Image (tube, coloured by chain):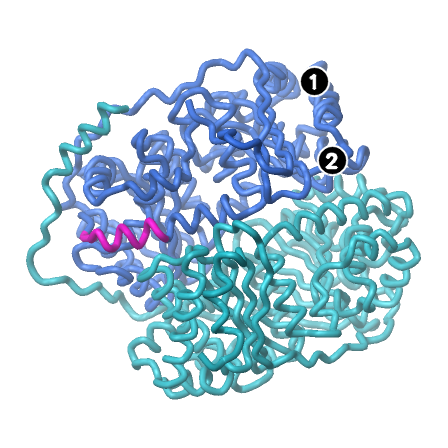
Chain colours: A blue, B cyan
Amino acid sequence: MPITYYKLPNGLRVILSPDSTAPTVVTAVYYRIGFRVEPRDRTGFAHLFEHMMFQGSQNLGKMEFIRLVQANGGVLNGSTRFDFTNYFELLPSNKLETALWAEADRMKGLAITDENLKNQQGVVSNEVKVNVLNQPYGGFPWLWIPQYANENWYNSHNFYGELKDIEAATLSDVQAFFKTYYAPNNAALAIVGDFDPEQARQMVAKYFSAIPPAKLPAPPDLTEPRQEKEKTATRKDPLANRPALAFAYHMPPRNSPEYFAMGLLDQMLVQGDDSLLYQELVKKRGYTGDVSGAINELGNMFNYDGPMLWTVSLFHDATVKPEQILSAVDTVIEGLQSKPVDQSLVDRSITKIRSNLYDTLGQFGGFGRADLMASYALFDDDPGRINSLEADFRKVTPQLVERTAREYLRKTNRTVLLLEPGAAPPGAHQEKSK
Amino acid sequence: MRLLWSVIMLSAMSSEVFAGPRETPPQGPPPKPFHLPATTDFTLPNGMRVTIVPYGNVPKIAVRAFVSAGAIDEAERQVWLSKLNAALMKEGTHTRSAEQVAREAAEMGGQIEVDSGSDFTSVGGVVLSDFATRFVALVADVLTAPALPASELPRLKADLLRELSIDRSEPGALARERFLKTLFPGHPYGRVFPSDSELKGYTLEDVQTFYRKNFDAVRTHLYIVGRLEGDLRRAAEGAFGGWPKGAPEPGLPAHPVKARSLQFIDRPSAAQSNLLIGLPVADPSSPDYIKLDVMNSLLGGSFASRITSNIREQKGYTYSPVSSVSTRRHLAYWVQSADVTTAVTGPSLKEIFYEIDRLRKAPPSGEELKGIQNYLAGLFVLRNTISPDAIIGQLHFVDSQGLDRSYLSTYVQKVMEVKPADVQAMAETYLVPSKMTIVVVGDKAKIADQIAPYESAAQ
């Protein structure tokens, strides 16, 4: 895929990737600030802040950003993830300049009021209620399992936020967060779609080059210690009817050979109904109707930068005990640790991951491609990595799969989370606090 | 971490000051023309319809057959039988075990998906284009020659019982069940969940009969969309040509209820109330349908819409309110949904009805309408380009509603022709509060008083 990558003098990373399949264009701005790195007394703040980016800037008052994109025939969104917060628009291709102007406007600064903040605290509290507090299995396992598996606060706090923390945020918190992290030298801008790269380059310079860079704080230490003992946690869910089980293993370091092997192990074990755990737990034993799993449950195996978990989860009946499920899982995993897998299984996993990669890159009118390129620009200074991923997976051998399974699918590298229907005993505090 | 935070606090001392007049956004050049991808349509001698659409340069292809067989074909005590049938269809064919089917599809970079809905069951998947013709044959095998093995039935029933139990614990699902039950009494569209005992009682013979009665060539439309490789027409003819023609679907007209009622489901200590408010409206074949689409987008169907602006962006009562025009075959209903904080259940209802009334009483400004028209025109391009499955979705909608394909080619023009007075007329004609069904799932002790005034339309 064609990629032009350069930096403006103020440090903004710019990635241009033209594709004339449809007369549309994706404009995506990624800031290198995710929910891992948020103030300790303000859990959920990175995400609350994301909402504030829609509340007004110098030339666009409240609701005007949203109306501008809509009235030009586009859709927009923002999301907060482990290691970035993103904002993107998908518009008819003739509206690229409009999108660049609007994104630059809010990169220059926010113009918001206490009333805007109060309003979004209400919206975000409702978001947490609808997705977690008022939902059976809310937050299972994506919000909970990192809190049990990780030891470092940055990786193990409640990143959706405690309601009291969300409600305690002030306007000066918002302005401070903006000044610290929302600078061009902490951001990447990706443009994908039907546009002329030379014209885009000029427009980017026109709207973004005058935005001053900021002095960025030193990145905190995100590392996790090597896990040496299996952990098991139980949560009660008063809204749930059936038990559920999740388990997670710490991933190998990003971009290492073992990391790519884990990408294939994920395919072998849980992706698709040909996968080994689906065949074992669903088809053969009938313990559950489906097995889901992912490297990075809030994205994919490419768009994060820091410690990560490979997580698997399923729902089951009370008549099936967690020990039975885990013992069946162990049997399958031991099979991968005791001898090299068949080359045909490796080949099939590569086919699946290649097919999956095409979907990711084509996802949502080119947004998926922008997402990966912006992530690689921010984390590795190399968005062109998207063109070599397939080759990296092809280097994985059956021997490497076996070695990776032995080290990373060790039981002692595992955290098990059991969800049981029913109310927690009075006084019990289920939130993980460290 | 404390240190970092105090640094942030210091830098916050100077607050943002903007001076000077506001800039207006650059408009950009005129839009590039958009042409819908060309389709090739043909019918096999057995009556099965096939549509092939070359699209995109990503080497992937979607192959999906829609059979008009679904919940609508279930008898009164057969709720979810179509779902059980769909699950059993994945359990192998006369010549391939389930594991073989799964493995072959995986070797093509995809998997076989069988999904059942109100009116249709779809069988298909998305694979690497290199394997397009082989995948057509695999889809045909699963669709036309499923083994429906007795051995897997108890396990699949246990899975569906678990799914049912989990569904029943979700407040949104409970609201939806009550809403559809109220709108479609006595019709399969209104039967969302079976009872446990009903589900437990289904036999292999029930499934076999359901399949035999409802799956045949004349009720099926195959869509193949993506980067095409190989002779797909021949592949479709070869794989499906021998399937018996069968008989067209019997159809079962529904007569949705248009009457005011307040339906309440108590969910003690719920943090939110789930609201659904709606009623039947004109179906897709009506000349009003596109105007309704515009009216809906302006009222509650988009981020910048009136109801969302009001209860989310002004009041902060909710996170994701949305209204939509939902369709079944040859009918449609409008529904606004919102999950709101318990304490503001009454005020949320008040604001939703306020916005409905406001639009019924006065037309929107030309500028507000123009914004929505541009939005729908842009969305139309996205819906027809974003993925092979999105394109299939558009074509299947038009075909299954019995519309001419020109519905798509004239859609943008028709959206652009809508006048402010049309929008008001649509709200006035169709969104009649005294005929709406209101469903509230929430904490009775806290909200009974708040919702009592909505029992009748006279507030």
Secondary-structure class at tag 1: loop
Q: Which corner quadrant holds the C terminus of chain A?
A: top left
User: Which is more foreground, mark 2 or mark 1?
Assistant: 2
Q: Which corner quadrant holds the N terminus of chain A?
A: top left
Q: Which mark is residue A318?
A: 2
**Does the magenta run of residues contain A114?**
yes
**Does the magenta run of residues contain A93?**
no
Q: Position of residue B403 (x, y in %)?
A: 62, 80
Identify which residue, A327 or A368, lies in the foreground. Answer: A327
Asked whether residue A202 appears in the rendered view, the answer is: no
Q: Position of residue A424 (x, y in %)?
A: 57, 34
Identify which residue, A430 or A87, lies in the foreground. Answer: A430
Q: Amino acid under label 1? A: Pro
Secondary-structure class at tag 2: loop
Span colored in magenta: A111-122
Q: Residue B265's image quarter?
A: bottom right
Q: The numbered mark 2 sits on a residue in which chain?
A: A
Q: CA distance from mark 2 to mark 1?
A: 36 Å
Q: Which mark is residue A340?
A: 1
